[in-house]
Amino acid sequence: GGVGEYLIHDVNGIVIDSFDDEKPEAIVDSLGDAVLDLVLDDAKRLRLAKGGIDTVVNGGFLVQDFTNKYLELYESLVN
């Protein structure tokens, strides 16, 4: 699993276009544009923050969620 499993563009984060070997500065421009967009758009910044919190709380990313998963794994190995 990776970022793509939980990050949804414009819902709980922003996905920047992939790196282009022929134009490496493009990723810097894309990142700068995304940051500037968040600085200038209060509603979008708040919506993405709420989406991120919702992903963590309801998506199984809390410490207790990880603890429970490891406990279940360890118990399955012992039994």
Image (cartoon, rainbow, N blue to C red):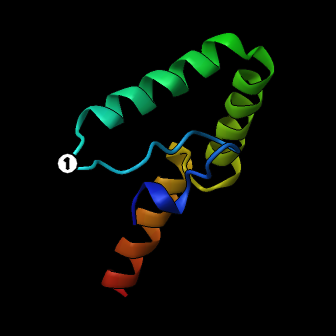
The image shows a total of numbered marks equal to 1
Q: Nearer the viewer, residue 12 or 65?
A: 12
Q: Is residue 68 left or right of residue 59?
A: left
Query: What is the residue that sits farthest to the bottom in this orientation?
Result: 79
Image quarter (top left, top right, bottom left or bottom right) of the N terminus: bottom left
At horizontal 70% and vertical 51% (from top left) the residue drawn is 58
- Measured as percent of width and height from the top left, residue 48 is found at 69, 33
At horizontal 35% and vertical 72% (from top left) the residue drawn is 74
At horizontal 67% and vertical 36% (from top left) the residue drawn is 53
Q: Is residue 78 above or below residue 57?
A: below
* Crowd class of label 1 (few under 14; some 14 to 19; many from 20; radius 10 Å): few
Q: Is residue 76 above or below residue 27?
A: below
The image quarter containing residue 54 is: top right
Q: Is residue 25 above or below residue 38?
A: below
At horizontal 33% and vertical 36% (from top left) the residue drawn is 26
Image quarter (top left, top right, bottom left or bottom right) of the C terminus: bottom left
In this figure, which residue is indicated by the disc labeled 1?
22
- Measured as percent of width and height from the top left, residue 55 is found at 66, 47
For badge 1, the amino acid type reads: Glu
Q: Nearer the viewer, residue 25 or 49?
A: 25
- Measured as percent of width and height from the top left, residue 3 is found at 44, 54
- Measured as percent of width and height from the top left, residue 75 is found at 40, 76
Give the SS element for disc 1.
Answer: loop
Query: What is the residue that sits farthest to the right in this orientation?
Result: 43
Q: Nearer the viewer, residue 29 or 57?
A: 29
Q: Is residue 58 left or right of residue 29?
A: right
The image quarter containing residue 56 is: top right
